[in-house]
Every structure is written in structure tokens, then in C-alpha cells.
Image: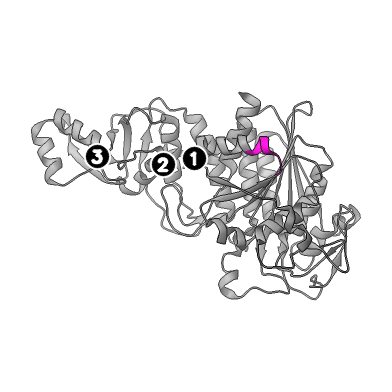
Amino acid sequence: MHNHLLEDQTLECTPLYLLTPDLLQHWLKMADPAIAMQVRANQFEARAGEVFFVPGKAGGQIALAGLGALGTETDMARLPDVLVAGQYVLHFAPGGLDRTQLAFHWLLGCYRFEPYQRKKSKLPRLLVVGADRDTAMAQASAIKLARDLINTPASDMGTEALEQAVRDLGKEFGAEVTSIVGDDLLSQNYPMIHAVGRAAEQAPRLVHLVWGDEDHPAISLVGKGVIFDTGGLNIKSGNFMKLMKKDMGGAANALALAQMIMQGNLPVFLNVFLPIVDNAIAGNAYRPSDVLASRAGMSVEIDNTDAEGRLILADALTRAVEDQPELLIDFATLTGAARTALGPELAPFYTGADDWATRLEAAAISAGDPVWRMPLWAGYDSMLDSDIADICHTASSPMAGSVTAALFLQRFVGDTPWMHFDIYGWSPKDRPGQPTGGAAQGPLAVFAMLKEKYSG
């Protein structure tokens, strides 16, 4: 992605004009009549993603690119697909558009996941004068990290590989990374992480990244890292299992946010806890009707082994709370109910902290990273009652499934200010800057919120 954003202009750069339909009419009035006639003859109307090349001075050419009637920065992401490979310099853009955001969305539009393909895409390169190139590249790099991790098949993204990705990120920014693996999870009191992952060939683990000054406000992140979810003994049918390489999307999004925080050098003390497991099937797999111990001391009745994410999150959240962070945030591809409620593009979040919710909603608008607050409705809490244990990990009713999953997690965070994201982590169709595949949902909004809070 990064080599598609130029640092300096070269003689080979083609001037690029970003136009809305209204701006196009003004431009045509000022253009050479012969050029204006050619543009009209070819019916270029500056629709979103529409491109037309016209002759320039000294035998060169200029590129006209349409943004559509709304003309937002997001529309910039359409252009790498439609401009021919070459070098461009942004010569004109509507005055209200932010140059750094234009550069960022250009990079998002240049994203390709092609490690398994012999033929690689040839994409255009662009210079955006006036943009903060470093900021655009840093945020695009974090989004790329999340997408790449999610898109990688579980054959190459096992529990060991995902831990290595955390270690690589930690090394880049001078963070400390440790892990608790296999049976050590039992001796160090993470029984539910162990139970969910013990049937897999690669051992379950809890990976912990620490960065920053301990004297700064403590921010903790937790991300669900199920590298593949068969459903366990409650095995999924084939059509529901196909995308389950994305079930570590919570961990990927937590890492993307961690990268933004470290790249931005925010004055916070960052802890990231990633419970990483493969929900596989073997003779020692945990079963429906089992009762599991938890790090919090609560006994948990298992109703359905395909609801494994909340179990590993519960142990990780319990550990995160022990540090008494100022804010605790978790990301998880947790429930199909959240998709039914809000679809694949909108990230639902839960919190009992109204002040943080207000901050996040404002930041999400400015960051262009849509989120929607969902209710922690206490009236449904009794659905988690168990006749045999302290709590059942799934509700007695299929209704409000995302809400009851959040209520289960809430039992493990106490009074700690907490936000829970129940994300999809996947784009089922191509959108500007978001091809089909792994998706980052929430990190840009949360980073904007934290940056405003701690660096404003």
C-alpha cells in the first residue's frame, strides 16, 4: 500500500483533478473549448469513480476523476481501481476535502491481499500535496494489519502464527510481549481459555503486550483470537463454517488499534490481552453440559460449544480488570445476532459508561468509522441463570443474542469502565476502500476518541 503514495513529484506525474458534477461544469467553462467539447462528447459527468483523460500542454495529459454529487474523501478509494497504472499528482480537489483523509482513502483503495496469487496487481501511485503523509500511512498500515491477519487462512494463521504477529508488532515499537501457553494456562488460572483450545493441535495461549509509561493513564485492550471456529462438538454446518478463519477478527482489530496508539505515541500505558485458541474437535474437547471454572471464580455452565468466544474473553477480561485500567475495550466477532440487528457494515458497541459512549460517537463521525450503541438491558440478565452453576454462558432464549452475550461479559468486568464491540470483521461485498474480505471495524473511531482525550 505505502509505495502507492509518493513523497515527491516527478516529471512523469499526470495532474489529477477531482471533480463533482457541479465543479465539472465550472471547469468546462474555463477549459480550452476543444477540450471541453471532447469531454462532453465522451459524456464524462464526474460520477463517482468515473475517469477521463484529456490532452494537456506539451503533448501530455491530465486526468479528470469523478467523486459524485456528494464528493467525500471516501470516494477517493474508488480511483486506484479505475486509473491506469502510472504516477499522478493531485492538482485539484474540492476545497472542503481534507488532504490527509484523501491520501488515507487512496491507500485504502490500494489494498490488495495477494500472497497466494502469482499475478500481482499493478496500481497507480499518487502524490497528495498538503497531506500529512506519515499520518495517512500510519493509519492505513494499521488497517492493513487487521485485514491481512483476518484474510490469512488458518492453515497459515494458527495460534503460534498469531502470537508471532503480536511479537513482531511489539518488536517494531519496543513493547514487551509475553505468553502463557498450553497447560500453563491451568497453573496460572485461565481455565476457560485452556478448555476451549485444548482439543487443537496448536496449543491455546494468552498473549500479553505492554507498552508505554506506567505513570500514564492505563488503557487495556482485549481481542477474541479464535483462529478457526468449527463450533466444537456443536459443529457448524459447512455454509456457516466457511468464513470462520475470520473468528480472530477481534484480536486483529485490537492489534490494529494498538498499532495506532503506539505509532501515535499516545501518552497512555497500554496493555493488550489476546486469548488465542483453535476451537477444534477431538476426544478431549469440552462438551455441552460441562461446568467450567473461570479465573473470576464463577462456575460456568456450557450450553453450546459454538459460543466459545465469550468464554475465552471472560478469562482475559478478568485478567485485564486486575490492572484497574481507566478504560477497558474488547473487540470480538461474537454473535450472529449482532449481524441480524445491524448488518455487516455497522459496528455495535456496548458500554455502561455514558461519558465514554458520547466521546466515541463523536469520534466515530469524525473518523468515518461507523459505530452504534446497543443496550446492556438488565432485564435480560436472568436469561443467563443456571440450575447447576453460577451462570450459564448462553441465554435461555434465542432472542436478543448480542445483548445477552454482552451481559455475560459484563459479569467479568465489575465496575471498570468498559466497552465491548461485537463486530463482523468481514466485508461480504466490495465497497470503496473495502474489498471483500477482512475488515477493521472500530479501531479508527476508538483511536480518534483516545487521541482527543489524551493528546487534545
Q: Nearer the viewer, residue 193 or 411?
A: 411
Do we see residue 265 in this rendering?
A: no
What is the spatial separation of the Cα atoms under label 2 and label 1, in whole angstroms?
A: 8 Å
- Residue at 52% from the left image edge and 45% from the top image edge: 370
Checking the image for residue 135, the label placed there is: none
| Position of residue 396 measured from the top left corner of the image (x, y, whole percent) | 74, 68
Helix, strand or loop at disc 1?
Answer: loop
Q: Earlier in the sequence, mark 2 or mark 1?
A: 2
Hey, which quadrant is residue 338 in on the image?
A: bottom right
| Number of the label disc, if any, that sits on residue 74 | 2
Residue in front for this viewpoint, 7 or 333: 333
The residues tagged by marks 3 and 1 sit, at their Cα atoms, a distance apart of 23 Å
Q: Position of residue 80 (x, y in %)?
A: 36, 45
Residue, x 73% and y 30% (percent of image)?
212
Q: Amino acid at mark 1?
A: Gly
- The first of marks 3 and 1 along the sequence is 3
Give the number of callouts: 3
Looking at the picture, tell me which residue is in the foreground, 257 or 291: 291
Cα separation between marks 3 and 2: 17 Å
Q: Is residue 349 above or below residue 294?
A: above
Percent position (x, y) of residue 377? 70, 53
Which residue is denoted by mark 3 in the rendering? 21
| Region rendered in magenta | 352-357
**Residue drawn 61% across and 36% down?**
358
Whichever of callouts 3 and 2 sits on the residue coming sooner in the sequence is 3
Give residue 368's mark: 1
Tag 2 and tag 1, C-beta contact below 8 Å: yes
Local crowd size for mark 2, using a 10 Å CA cut-off: few (<14), some (14–19), many (≥20) = some
Report crowding for label 1: few under 14, some 14 to 19, many 20 or more residues within 10 A (C-alpha): some
